[in-house]
Image (cartoon, rainbow, N blue to C red):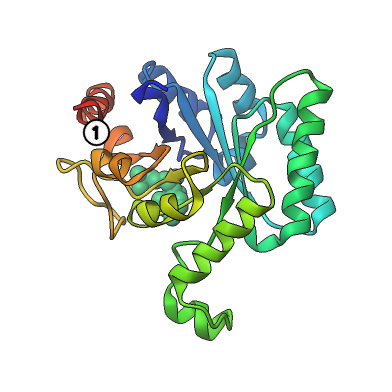
Amino acid sequence: MAVADRIIVPLDVASEREALALVERLPQVTFWKVGLELFVSSGPGILEQLKQRQKRIFLDLKLHDIPNTMAGACRAAARYGVDLLTVHAAAGKTALVDCLEAAQTGAADVGIQPPQIIAVTLLTSIHARALAFELKVSLELTDYALQMALLAQESGLSGVVCSPQEAAALRQVLGSEFALVCPGVRPAWAGKNDQQRSMSPADAMQAGATYLVIGRPITAAAEPAAAFEQICQEISE
Ligand code: C5P
């Protein structure tokens, strides 16, 4: 896979108009992330627009519901021709297995490839104290995230979202085929923003990331296209 195809840029904007302006500004970007805010505000029209431009799509909806409802959403998302789709591992094995099957059915309905289903193990907004005292989970945070990743793998999912800090350890346990999708990536020349424990693109790749989700260092740069090129260059070196 070419380096540029391993960088996913989030469309963290509130309207289809703003999203398409960003896409036009960055023709080199081949893989875009559509998250909840944009999907809820623009509807599936944005997916069609991206497909028309031959872009790959990471539909980051982080689905979490009863198995039947999650499966229905996966079936529908697969028909749009998205490439990656997120669900919460904590929904449980039945839900994950059903999601996988539904995505295959949805894609087959329209004669296309199914998306890779990617699990969210634990939201980074849940810190150790919240896990223990609010969610009443007695495992250590990293162990819980690992257990959720193993559950996703056992259920047949294609990968997990994880911090680049966890990538090396997960890669070792989960093997070379499992996809690790890593946000929290910052080149040395970019501001950290709200990413506390970030890692450089080259280090994250070295640690075993399959895809890097990199937003503001590219989208908020004075010259976004140059920033994207610079990141590709750094990874290739
Ligand atoms: O601008 P930035 O590079 O921080 O954007 C990272 C993207 O990855 C955002 O869309 C953000 O919501 C997402 N993300 C994250 N940290 C997580 C999970 C997702 O930054 N733990």
Residue drawn where x is 55% and y is 29% of the image: 57
Residue drawn where x is 24% and y is 33% of the image: 221
As displayed, is residue 216 above or below residue 163? above
x then y, percent, for residue 95: 76, 55
Q: Nearer the viewer, residue 234 or 123?
A: 234
Q: Quadrant of residue 3?
A: top left
Q: Quadrant of the C terminus?
A: top left
x then y, percent, for residue 126: 47, 70
Q: Quadrant of residue 81?
A: top right
Residue furthest out toward the left = 189
Q: Would residue 88 be seen by someone viewing this image from the given angle?
A: no
> How many numbered tags mark residues here?
1
Please tell me how crowded label 1 is: few (under 14), some (14-19), or many (20+) other residues with Cα within 10 Å.
some
Residue drawn where x is 33% and y is 33% of the image: 219
Q: Quadrant of the N terminus?
A: top left
Q: Is mark 1 within 8 Å of ligand 1?
A: no
Q: Pointer 1: what residue?
A: 221
| Left or right: residue 3 compared with residue 8 | left
Residue drawn where x is 63% and y is 29% of the image: 82
x then y, percent, for residue 171: 43, 49
As displayed, is residue 153 above or below residue 232? below
Q: Amino acid at mark 1?
A: Ala
x then y, percent, for residue 78: 72, 31
Residue furthest out toward the bottom = 133
Q: Would residue 74 be seen by someone viewing this image from the given angle?
A: yes
| Left or right: residue 21 compared with residue 220 | right
* SS of the residue under disc 1: loop
